[in-house]
Amino acid sequence: MMNEVTNSVVEALPQFQGYVYPNEANFHPVWSTLIVVYPYITGLVAGAFIMASLVRVFDVKALAPVYRLSMLTALAFLLCATLPLLCHLGHPERCYEIMMTPHMTSPMAIFGFVYAWYLMAVLLLELWFDYRQDFVKWSKTTAGFKGFLYRVLTLGVTDVSEKSVRLDMKMEWILSIVGIPSAFLLHGYVGFIFGSIKANPWWGNVLMPIMFILSAIVSGIALCVFNYIVLNWIRRRPLDMRCLDAMAMFLFYALVMDAVVEGLDVLHRGYAAEEGFAVLQTMIHEKLFYTLNIGQVGVGTLVPLLLLGLLQVLPRRVPEATRRVMIFCSGAMILLGVLMMRWNVVMGGQFFSKSFRGVMSYKMEFAGQEGWLISAVIMCLPFIILTVLVKLFLSERLQPCEHVLEKSSKA
Amino acid sequence: MNHTINRRSSLLRMGAAMAGLLTVSFARAAKAAVQTVFVSTTAPKGYDPTKHKWLMCIDASKCIGCGLCAEACKKENGVPEGPYYRTWIERYIIPKPKPGSDLTRGEAIVDSPNGGMHGFPEPTLPKDKIEHAFFVPKLCNLCENPPCIQVCPVGATFTAPDGAVLIDPNYCIGCAFCIQACPYGARFLNPATKTAEKCTLCYHRISRGLKPACVEVCPAEARIFGDLKNLAADDPLQKFYEKNRVQVLKPHLGTEPRVLYAGLDKEVR
Amino acid sequence: MHRFKLPPQILRLILVAMAIVGSYLVARSFLVPPSFGEYGWYRGDALKLIAARDPVFAGKQACDECHSDILHKLAKDAHKTLSCEGCHGVSREHCDNPDILPVKATGSHCIRCHEANLARPAWLKQIVVKDHYGPKCTECHLPHQPTQSP
């Protein structure tokens, strides 16, 4: 009789091969699509911000046309960055505890503060200083709700004298400088959430934060490329090819760095072949074959590397229209590839048992708290917010004050 | 003129003081109301957690794999049905190496059907192919450096002064970070309460002077439970140390488990 | 030397920052549970909360009050390490009210421990139930004194 009971259980759970701890023999991993989306979104924030900082800190004038767009992109995505975390909690109503009694040794608790710091002290402040002068101007010229909004956003400071604008520029520059390490911190910390888990050889890795930062930069620039092209396509305006080429160049270099570090990681794992390496190997060959080998490495890295590399080698030979298509395609592919990378990290870490003796698989649900529908909605949300932000702050009808960019380039 | 101003300002001051008092008392009341939400107990009286240090050790060579402990644990703690176990039993079957191979032993076959709750079926391998086989009861390892507590973002899981690693069911936010961080798979997310759960050493029992349920029902004395701060001379725990060479699980992770095992084999992790 | 004056935008931001930090501190004083930090970075009350659960198993000691004869018998024979509730099931209600009898122990559970299994340690006396004398264990073995027969 006992034989029957146990055998039927083994049959009922065919998705487990080998031995997994009884608590792991669950139908869903405890972290699923929502946690895949979470590092993806934060990565896009950090990447878009770093890309914008190139203008302010390193004074890359070619990128000036996308400065505001990428800052607004960063903001739109940052506003949604905690949503997936929140949705996946068992008790979302207790989330305030993370801020009230943060446990200082926990990467997740510190993330709350890093997030708050980044949102309030870096991104919003820099945007405010950048826009302050325009808010003053627009609040005078615009009527109705929008005008009221601009007036509120000035925070009551209407001083746009030369001296005070110069101070704004200075502050912006300082904030950018503070912002780059903060962006690294923001996303490095997300990497650390995984990298700090020593129980899991797929995650517990010193390179993890670095890999997260580099892939974040790559995906952020790719997103800016994507948004820039799409926005100008919607507005039926010509692209600034100098800007696009510059973005493609930075994208290429970032991608090279990212590919090198990730390759290093693979090499190191293979060479050290520590405990549990066998189970990781079966994962790469079976469970993650499509998302890792084809998605992340092929589509997400090699093809864009080839395309963008070609543009670097023969910059002028390729006609403009083709160049545009190539850059657009590689941007889109990179965005997809980085999403795959997040999937491989997050889900890959849960596809094998911590006993290293078995693997589980996972069938994605459609609806429900852990279904992919909610993740898809969360992925769309930043784009909706971005649309609103662009309507408000990057409107074609409201021209920014002329001298802002000039001044900054002189300063 | 001066006079009126004086009077007015003193009136103002009094008004301000009244308002301040009102807000303070209102704030006090509000705070008390908020905080009663957190407080509720009918706990056993007279238990001082600072006067104990509980510990469970496992003598794996004694375990007969009857599964009473895993079953009792579920009953005692109301653990939901399904793949949720605060304690469970693993069976390790070490096959003989294939004839002609120069390995010392074959690849271990491990199983734990239903956490071993209803016993184990006969091994699928024939007897003459098996080098040896044994059972290992598993539970929370009561780490000295618990990675699960380290990662909890809100301080909902903690090592109590008496050595038990506990989870505050009213404070846990259910982020499952601790489940990921536990190298031993000892934690799970309770689908009913949506909070993390784990072995509490039957805290409600030990604080009343009873033994944990698994220790209570174990017929083979494979689980040795005791209080390090109140060790009797012939305490089973004391004898266990003295008699055995002990081992911990996954020592390379530096978690320093306090749960000591005797009679393990190299395959156990 | 004229007085140093903060630029208006900086002043405004400092005010906003102070408002944010202030409201955080106020919220914190409300929302941190009172016993937080009593023993460490957690709610001290949690210990009591977790301890408040009612035990399910009564424990061997509880049976001593009324069945001390059986305890003595048990302690003298091979089943001395066994717990009453291992065979009789949870008997807490029975302790409080002896009229509620524990589930009848029939002896079918004997094989749970004694059925031969390769992984079982050698010191445990195991039988292959098929080849043993018969399926009704209690006919030949007293459950509380297993080495003796009725």
Image: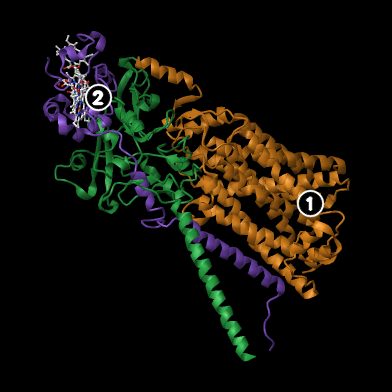
Q: Which residue is painted at 84% across and 66% down in the image?
A: A403
Q: Which chain is orange?
A: A
Instruction: Give the vertical position of B146 relative to A181 (above or below).
Output: above
**What residue is disc 2 on?**
C101
Q: Where residue A8 sits in the image (x, y, percent)? A: 43, 17
Q: Where residue A322 sits in the image (x, y, percent)? A: 84, 40
Q: Which residue is painted at 56% across and 75% down in the image?
A: B15
Image quadrant occupied by the C terminus of chain A: bottom right
Relative depth, front residue between A38 and C94: C94
Residue B231 is marked as: none
Quadrant hosting residue B166: top left
Q: Is residue C50 among what the camera can see? A: yes
Relative depth, front residue between A13 and A142: A142
Answer with left or right where residue B44 lies relative to residue B19: left
Label 1 amino acid? Val
Q: Which color has been applied to chain C in this rendered view? A: purple
Relative depth, front residue between A222 and A114: A114
Q: Which element carries disc 2, helix, strand or loop?
A: loop
Q: Which element carries disc 1, helix, strand or loop?
A: helix
**What residue is disc 1 on?**
A390
| Protein image colouring | by chain
Q: Is residue B219 among what the camera can see? A: no
Q: Which chain is green?
A: B
